[in-house]
Image (cartoon, grey):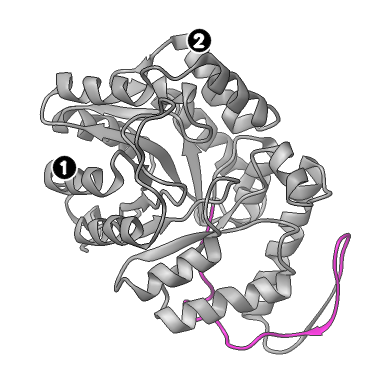
Amino acid sequence: MRPLEFGWYLPSNGDTTSYAAGHDAIPAGTAMFDRVVQAAEAAGFEYMLVPVALPCWEAWVTTAFMAGRSSRIRMLVAARPGYINPVMLAKMVTTFDQLTGGRVCVNLIAGQSEQEAAADGIRYAKEDRYALMAEEVGIMKRLWTADGPIDHAGRFHTLRSARIIPPPFQQPHPRFYLGGGSREAWEISAEHADVHLFWGDTPEGIALQMAEIRAMAAKHGRADQLGFGMRLQILCRETEAEALAAAQELVRDVPAERTAALRANVANSVANQRVQALAREHGDWIAPNLWTGLTRARQGAGIAVVGNPAQCAAVLQRFIDIGCHSFCLSGYLHDEEATRFARWVRPILAERNGARMLAA
């Protein structure tokens, strides 16, 4: 069985305990980033997800800066098709990899929002972005593993005698993570990803999806190479009542106009639509201690684990038991929630899973 790993999230658009309009938020910047990254390292998290979206600070600069201000945690940073030439991106990744001694992994994102892609000057439709991503990942892997220069003649790129320096520090190359709910996303995970991260769903629903993606990976000879994980929010408090109160505070007084706007922004994202559908079909709770309320206030991973330490550990254990090994988590405030996870939840999981827990 794979070792279990836990990642945390850097809220590069700011942090908060309430999404209500006018509520005081903690601004993005060095001071807050330091608190979150230091708390995540102290809590034993193995990697840090740095987001990309319109409200977020630029991910690669933020990632490089915070890697220099931390000592152990790996940075999970986005590669988006069409934004950076794949030869340059491959060189950026391996330079980062060498300078940090292997503290980088790559998050494959085709884009949740057509509106944001258009605003960024990306001219490709969603289906083309996935095709471009597959071609660019293939190019990067070849550049990282080839004995000499490579040629490439593809749908989107033509290369002649391309090569990069330095080579990867991690062998054969840094790991790829991908989170997505569409068939196109699943196909890329099946062929290229090391970890496919699901957004929140019921354990039964995740198990069915895992089986399907694993069958797709088998066609590439990768059934045993692809791992699975969950991208979840977590709100853990000493008592269930305190956790529920914290959850309700996050979405209290969020106007319906905000919810409608964020849903329109991600209307073409299968993963976002699945999360929204779960909220419509099940209401606030899709399973014990799995809460949908955040879907009213934020796009992306809007399912939250809510409860006391034993309840939160039990939810994560259910996903472990069906075959998930990687958990990319976030909570509010992000430095404080990381500390609570380390103090209350991680010890329970360590007792239940023994040697599978990575020693941090």
Q: Is residue 292 visible?
A: no
Mark 1 and mark 2 in contact? Answer it, CB < 8 Å: no
Residue nearer the viewer, 324 or 244: 244
- x and y, in percent, of residue 69 in the image: 33, 72
Label at residue 352: 1
Question: Pointer 1: residues within 10 angstroms few (<14), some, or many (20+)?
Answer: few
> Against 267, is 12 above or below?
below
Residue nearer the viewer, 357 or 346: 346
- For disc 2, the marked residue is 281
Q: State the residue at coordinates (39%, 57%).
A: 48
Question: Pointer 2: residues within 10 angstroms few (<14), some, or many (20+)?
Answer: few
Q: State the residue at coordinates (47%, 26%).
A: 297
Residue nearer the viewer, 80 or 325: 80
Rendered image quadrant of residue 285: top left
Magenta stretch: includes residue 249: no
Magenta residues, dominant SS class: loop
Rendered image quadrant of residue 249: top left
Magenta stretch: includes residue 173: yes
Q: Is residue 319 left or right of residue 81?
A: left
- x and y, in percent, of residue 24 in the image: 34, 36
Q: State the residue at coordinates (66%, 35%).
A: 182
Q: What range is drawn magenta here? A: 153-177
Q: Regarding mark 2 in the picture, which secondary structure is present there?
A: helix
